[in-house]
Image (tube, helix red, strand yellow):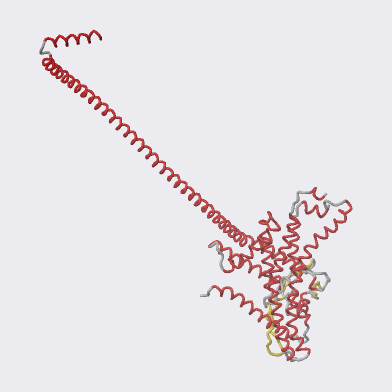
Amino acid sequence: MEIILPKFGLFFWTVVIFIIYYFIIAKFAWKPILSAIKKREEGIEKALQDAESAKQEIQKMNELTEKIHKEALAEKSRIIKEAEELANQKKQLAEQEASNIKAKKLAEVEQEITIMKNAAITEIKNLVGSLSVEIAEKILKEQLKNPKEQEAFAKAELDKINLN
Amino acid sequence: MFCKPNNYIRPFLIFLFSFVFNFTFINAKEEKASDFSVSELMFHHIKDSHDWHIADIPSGTNPDGTTRYIPIAIHLPWILYSSEKGLDIFFVEGHTEEEQAKSAEQKGYKYHHGEIHETSSGVHVLDLSITKTSLQMLIVALLLIFLFKRAANQYNENPLPKGFASFMEPIMVFVRDEVVKPNLGKHADNFLPYMLSLFFFIWFCNLFGLTPLNSNIAGNISVTAGLAILSFLIINFNGKRDYWEHIFWYPGVPLPVKFIMLPVELVGVFTKPFALTVRLFANISAGHFMVLGLISLIFVFSKGTSISAGLGIAPLSIFFSLFILSLEFLVAIVQAYVFTLLTCVFLGSALEEHHHEEAHH
C-alpha cells in the first residue's frame, strides 16, 4: 500500500528538480542543438534546391546553346544562299552586260560591214557600169560600123523610150 | 586508437557488466537477511528511503555469532518542517528502518512506515528530505545537462554531430517529427524543448534505474505524479477556448446531454494525469519487481530446501532476469516515448481550435 501512495517530499523535489533541469537544458542544450539541426536541415534543403536550379540553369543554357547553334546554322545557310543569289545576280548581270556589249559590237560591226558592203557594191556597180559602158561601147563600135545598123538601133531605142 | 565499431560496442559492454554487478549486489544484500523475505527485499528496493544503500560487505562476526556487515551507503539529510519546530535538518544513523526510527526518536520525531510525526504533539510533519530517489534524480538531471551541453558545444564547432550527439540526434529528431509536430502542429516549436526534456529525463531515469546502484526513479509514484502534474498544468494553462467549451458546455448536443457531459469531461481532465502517473510507475516498478523476484528465487530455494537447490535454480533465474532486464531497456525508452506522446496528444487536443461550430449542430 505504501508504494502506491505519493509522498509529498519526493513529489516536491521531482517538480523542483525537473523545472530547474528544464530551464537549464532548454537554454544551454536544446536551443543550440535544435537551431543547429534546423540550420543544417535548411542548408541541406537549400543545397538541394540550388542543385536543382543549377541543373535547370544548365538545361536552359544547353537549350540556349542549341538554339544559338541552330540560329547560327540557319544564318550560315541564309548567308550562303544570299551570297549565291548575289553571285548569280552578278553573274547574270555580267553576262547580260557582256552580251549587250557583244550585241553592240556586233551591231557596230554589222553596220560597218554594211557600209563597207555598200561601198564595195557601189564600187562594183561603178566598175561594172564603166566596164559595161566600155563593153557596150566596144560592141556598139563593132555592130554600128555601118550607118544602117546605126540608124535601126537608134530607131529601136527611141521606140523603147516612147513606150515607157 | 579505437576504430569506429568500438565506439558502439563499448557502451553495450558497460551495460552487460552492469547486469553482472547488479546480481552480485543484490546477492550481497540478501545474504544479510537471516529471515529472508522476498516482499521485504522488493519493497526495500522499490521504496524511497532516507539513505542511499547500495550493498553490504561482510566483515567478521558480531559478538552474538551473526555475520557483521559494512554497508556501502550514503546518509542523506532529513529535512522536516512542522509548524511547531519549524525547519529541521539533521542526519540519522543506521540503514534499516528500525535503526533509523530509533535515531529519529532521539531527535524528537516518530518515524513509522514512512510517516513522520512529532513525538511530543503527534503532529504530522512535512518531510522534504533529500531522499535516495530525489538525489538520483538530481544526478540524472545533472548528467543530462552535462551530456547535452557538451553535445551542443560540439554542434557549434561542427554542424555534423559526432559520438554522443550523433547517437542522440536521430532520437531528438524522432521526438520532434513523430511525437511533437504531428500533435502540436504550429505550436510545436514552443513546446518542443519541454517535450525533449521530458522524454530524455524519463528515459535516462529509467536507464539509471537499471544500473546496479539500487536505484528506482520512475518506479516511484511520487516521481511520476510530479511529472504528470507538470503535464497537467501545461495542458490546462494552454487550453484554448474550445477545450474549455468542450468541458463545461459540450457543443452540438441537446441541453440535458450538456449536463451529463459536464461531469464526464471534468473527470476526464483529471484522469489524464492520473493515467500518466500510474502507467509510468506501474511499468517501471513492474520490471524491477520481476527482476528482483526472479533473482530472489535462488534464495527462496536455498533457504527453503538446500543451498544446492538454490544453485540449481540460479542459471534459470539469471537467464530469465537477463531476459527481463533486456526487455526493460526497451521499456525504458518506450515508456519515455509513451509519456511524452500522451502529453503531446492531450496538449494537442487542448490547443486545438476548430472553426466549424455549425458542424456540431
Whole-percent x, y for residue B204 in the image: 67, 70
Q: Answer above or below: position of A61 versus B223.
A: above
Is A29 on the left-hand or right-hand side of B88?
A: left
Residue B87 showing in the rendered view: no
Is B210 on the left-hand or right-hand side of B274?
A: left
Residue at the extreme right: B256
- Of the pair B37 and B127, the residue shown nearer to us: B37
Whole-percent x, y for residue B135 in the image: 69, 71
Residue B41 showing in the rendered view: yes
Q: Quadrant of residue A29?
A: bottom right
Q: Answer above or below: position of A143 versus B143.
A: above
Q: Answer above or below: position of A116 versus A45.
A: above
Is B64 on the left-hand or right-hand side of A49?
A: right
- Of the pair B23 and A52, the residue shown nearer to us: A52
- Of the pair B94 and B276, the residue shown nearer to us: B276
- Identity of the residue drawn at 49% across and 49% down: A63
Q: Answer above or below: position of A159 versus B115.
A: above
Residue at the extreme top: A162
- Identity of the residue drawn at 64% across and 78% down: B16
- Identity of the residue drawn at 45% across and 44% down: A71
Q: How many marks?
A: 0
Is B75 on the left-hand or right-hand side of B266?
A: left
Whole-percent x, y for residue B359 in the image: 80, 49
Q: Quadrant of residue A48?
A: bottom right
Whole-percent x, y for residue A147 in the image: 11, 10
